[in-house]
Each structure stands twice: as structure tokens, then as C-alpha cells.
Image (spheres, rainbow, N blue to C red):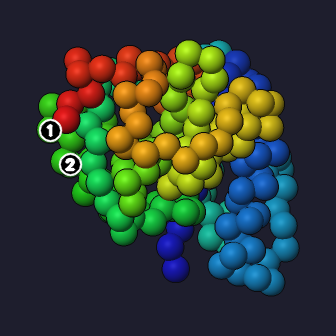
Amino acid sequence: MCQFIETIRIEDGQVYNLSYHTARMNRTRAAFWKEAAPIDLSGFISPPSLSGIWKCRIVYGKEIEEVGYTPYQMRMVSSLRPVASDTIDYSYKSTNREELNDLFARRGKADDILIVKDGYLTDTSIANIALYDGHTWYTPAHPLLQGTKRAELLDNRFIVEKDIRQAQLGDYSHIMLFNAMIDWKRLIIPVNEKYFIL
């Protein structure tokens, strides 16, 4: 059985979005182990007392298997290559990233890939996305992974769901990448030929 993961941001001892991570973990466990009782993640996390940003990585199956902490350094992404796959499925955040890694290997000179499924934008290899039309940040309605940061941003109405075709990229001025570790508005890329390697 595949192992699953939650990656949680801890900054100066504060644990971020724990309720969203707990909810997603328990949804995943319920999908694969219907008899599994919900787990409260707060009982498994002991934040490092050190300052700065840390990544807490929780590996789990039916039960919690491993909890680890590493200092976090954001990987800079300044260019993207659209890559198509109509068969990729990453509905659950698992340790098996083989399909994502195969697509990432096709990035060429770009820093990361923008995954297109059935003609629609989804995610990059590491993050959910939102696109800006000058007024509103729109996030693809059908991402590969329902990210915890994405869920928080939707709940707080910072982003709006929308089906976005690859052919509509030119309707937007900027694309933002975000995930549990990359905060809102930390990584924004202009949508033009300099930053999109086609």
C-alpha cells in the first residue's frame, strides 16, 4: 500500500494550517481504510524551538509512521514550461511522485512545469497555482492535488475557482505558485514569452 504525506509549515514555533492538514489526512485515510478512526495531528507535532521556517514532513498510512523536521529553503521558480498529460493522477499526496517526476524531466531549460490535463491548467510539479486577470486571482477548478493552502485561500476568498484552458493563458498577466510552504504572493511569475518556455 502506498504511503502518504503531509508537509506542514512551522515558523518560529508556530504550526500553520494544522486543521487543513488534519482534515486532508483523515479524508485520505478514510478513502483507503474505511474503518480507520480519525487522527488528531496536533498530538504528533513537537515544533522545533529554533527560529525560522521549518518543514514538518509526516508520513502515514493507516497510522502515523514518521514525523521529521528540516529547515526550509524555498526553491526559486522563475520560468515554466507547459507539459501535457491526460492520464496523470495525483489526487492524494503520496510518497510516489513517479508520474510527476517523469513530467518534470521534460522541463527543458525551465525551472518547473505547468501541467496541462485534457487541455486545462492544473498545477506545477510542486504547487497549486492562481492566475491574475487584473482584478481577480483564479485557481484551476480541477487541480491535480487539493492543496491545504489552496483550501485556506478559497475559504478566505483570496482566490476563485475557474476552469482555465491552456489556450487562455494569454488572458492573464501573472501566475502565482503556492503550497503549504510557499506563502501567498511569495512566488509570482509574469505570463509572457520570457518566463514561459513553450
* Residue 189 rendering spot, x and y as whole percentages: 40, 19
In the image, 55: left or right of 173?
right
* Residue 116 rendering spot, x and y as whole percentages: 37, 51
Residue drawn at 35 percent across, 64 percent down: 86
Q: Residue furthest toward the left?
A: 108
Pick whichever, 142 or 185, lies toward us. Answer: 142
Q: Which residue is mark 1?
A: 108
- As helix, strand or loop, the secondary structure at mark 2 comes to loop
How dense is the environment of label 2, judged by Cα within 10 Å: few (below 14), some, or many (20 and up)?
A: few
Pick whichever, 190 or 12, lies toward us. Answer: 190
Q: Are marks 1 and 2 in contact (CB under 8 Å)?
A: no
Q: Which mark is residue 105?
A: 2
Q: Which amino acid, by three-letter code, is at mark 2?
A: Ala
- The answer to whether 186 is drawn above or below residue 109 in the figure is above
Q: Which quadrant is the C terminus positioned in?
A: top left
- Residue at mark 1 to residue at mark 2: CA–CA distance: 7 Å
Q: Looking at the image, how many numbered discs can be counted on the residues?
A: 2
In the image, 70: left or right of 191?
right
* Residue 122 rendering spot, x and y as whole percentages: 47, 48
